Image (cartoon, rainbow, N blue to C red):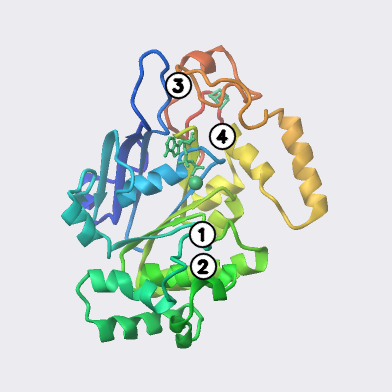
């Protein structure tokens, strides 16, 4: 299943090109087959572009991020970074890549080493790149100031900062080595709403300033809409819908994307109630309901529009309106 595949002549210039990525955890057993966590996912990110990866918990978002970062090996498919196939990059190549391909994780409490000062944490990746001690310390202080913290924060330890400040530090750690691509795995999910907005604005400013590409993972469509130009909607490791962020979020075509839009929390109680009613009217089942058929559409056991063909044939991505949608019954 392929989508957003760039023409061959632009492949060299893509920041990230993920094709038919499949990830299976654990050993495969014929007696008790476990479905892959990621199943034939393709997308590409141009330099300076942000792709939003959305889906409920367990849909395979983090696994895709880990495969891109080399923290989880791919079972099938390929991952290219500026035209260079890094799917099975050797450790030495990975170490070299580590400066250009960075990550910001969700949890600002566990992702920073409590025993290290912030200055040491930020200098560490630079030292690994061979940057001298004084220069690394100088760049660490500059990075702290860029994310809105005083340079004196370098002397302190993670526990002396709030969740929002720690996430700024994690952003500084990602940016201190001047990367090209940053995987942001639910970077604001653990923060309160006003802190979320500040960190999202910071990420947007840094991207625009430096021409960064983001693979931005979130379960919240509103968060993704703010930052991403294009969106990939995942369900059980498969792409359900993909297209321009405005098209996917404002005119969702796939029943699953519609369920996600209806479920997204909104600050106004009246609108929230209306959305809940719409969701109930759609008759969409709760997450985890039913066993997905391996042959048909993975969403069939929850889908109000499911018919026989949905249970026997896996729908391929096809153009519906302005998006690509994997659904037998989606219409413009
Ligand atoms: N280390 C692991 N070992 C085995 N299964 C895993 C592991 N990590 C994730 N999974 C499984 O892979 C699927 C996708 O998980 P994940 O990528 O974390 O989803 P998401 O980030 O969208 O919540 C889930 O079914 C999850 O239980
Ligand atoms: S293919 Fe069928 S079951 Fe799957 S989302 Fe479309 S209508 Fe629903
Ligand atoms: Mg995750």
Image x and y of residue 16, in percent: 30, 52
Give the number of the mark in front: 3 or 2: 2
Q: Is label 2 in contact with label 4 (beta carbons under 8 Å)?
A: no
The answer for how far apart the CA atoms under marks 4 and 1 are is 26 Å
Residue of label 1 = 187
Give the number of the mark in front: 3 or 4: 3
Q: Is residue 235 visible?
A: yes
Categorize mark 3 by other alpha carbons within 10 Å: few (<14), some (14-19), many (20+).
Answer: some
The numbered mark, 3 or 4, whose residue comes first in the sequence reads 4
**Disc 4 C-beta below 8 A from ligand 2:** yes
The residue shown at (76%, 41%) is 276
Image x and y of residue 71, in percent: 33, 48
Q: Which mark is residue 167?
A: 2
The answer for how far apart the CA atoms under marks 3 and 1 are is 33 Å
The numbered mark, 2 or 1, whose residue comes first in the sequence reads 2
Position of residue 263 in the picture relative to residue 144 (left or right):
right
Residue of label 3 = 314
Give the number of the mark in front: 3 or 1: 1
The answer for how far apart the CA atoms under marks 2 and 4 are is 33 Å
Position of residue 266 in the picture relative to residue 172 (left or right):
right
Categorize mark 4 by other alpha carbons within 10 Å: few (<14), some (14-19), many (20+).
Answer: many
Q: Is residue 324 visible?
A: no
Position of residue 240 in the picture relative to residue 251 (left or right):
left
Secondary structure beneath dot 2 equals helix
The residue shown at (49%, 38%) is 234
The answer for how far apart the CA atoms under marks 2 and 1 are is 7 Å
Secondary structure beneath dot 4 equals loop
Residue of label 4 = 254
């Amino acid at each position: 299943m392929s989508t957003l595949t760039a023409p061959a002549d632009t492949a060299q210039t893509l920041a990230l090109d993920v094709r038919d990525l499949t990830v299976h955890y654990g050993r495969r057993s014929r007696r008790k087959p476990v479905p892959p966590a990621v199943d034939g996912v393709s997308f590409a990110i141009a330099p300076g572009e942000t792709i939003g990866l959305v889906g409920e918990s367990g849909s395979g978002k983090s696994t895709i991020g880990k495969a891109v970062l080399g923290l989880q090996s791919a079972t099938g498919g390929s991952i290219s970074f500026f035209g260079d196939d890094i799917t099975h990059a050797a450790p030495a190549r990975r170490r070299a890549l580590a400066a250009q391909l960075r990550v910001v994780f969700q949890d600002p409490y566990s992702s920073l080493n409590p025993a290290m000062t912030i200055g040491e944490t930020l200098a560490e990746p630079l030292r690994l790149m061979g940057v001298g001690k004084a220069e690394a310390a100088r760049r660490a202080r500059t990075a702290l100031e860029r994310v809105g913290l005083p340079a004196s924060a370098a002397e302190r330890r993670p526990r002396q900062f709030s969740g929002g400040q720690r996430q700024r530090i994690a952003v500084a750690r990602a940016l201190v080595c001047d990367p090209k691509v940053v995987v942001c795995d639910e970077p604001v999910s653990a923060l309160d709403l006003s802190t979320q907005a500040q960190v999202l604005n910071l990420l947007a400013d840094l991207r625009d300033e430096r021409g960064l590409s983001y693979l931005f993972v979130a379960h919240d469509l509103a968060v993704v809409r703010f930052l991403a130009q294009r969106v990939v909607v995942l369900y059980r490791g498969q792409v359900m819908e993909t297209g321009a962020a405005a098209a996917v979020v404002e005119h969702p075509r796939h029943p699953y994307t519609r369920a996600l839009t209806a479920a997204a929390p909104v600050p106004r109680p009246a609108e929230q109630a209306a959305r809940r009613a719409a969701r109930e009217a759609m008759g969409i089942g709760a997450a985890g309901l039913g066993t997905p058929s391996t042959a048909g559409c993975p969403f069939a056991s929850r889908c109000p529009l499911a018919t026989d063909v949905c249970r026997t044939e896996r729908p391929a991505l096809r153009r519906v309106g302005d998006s690509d949608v994997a659904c037998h019954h989606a219409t413009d």
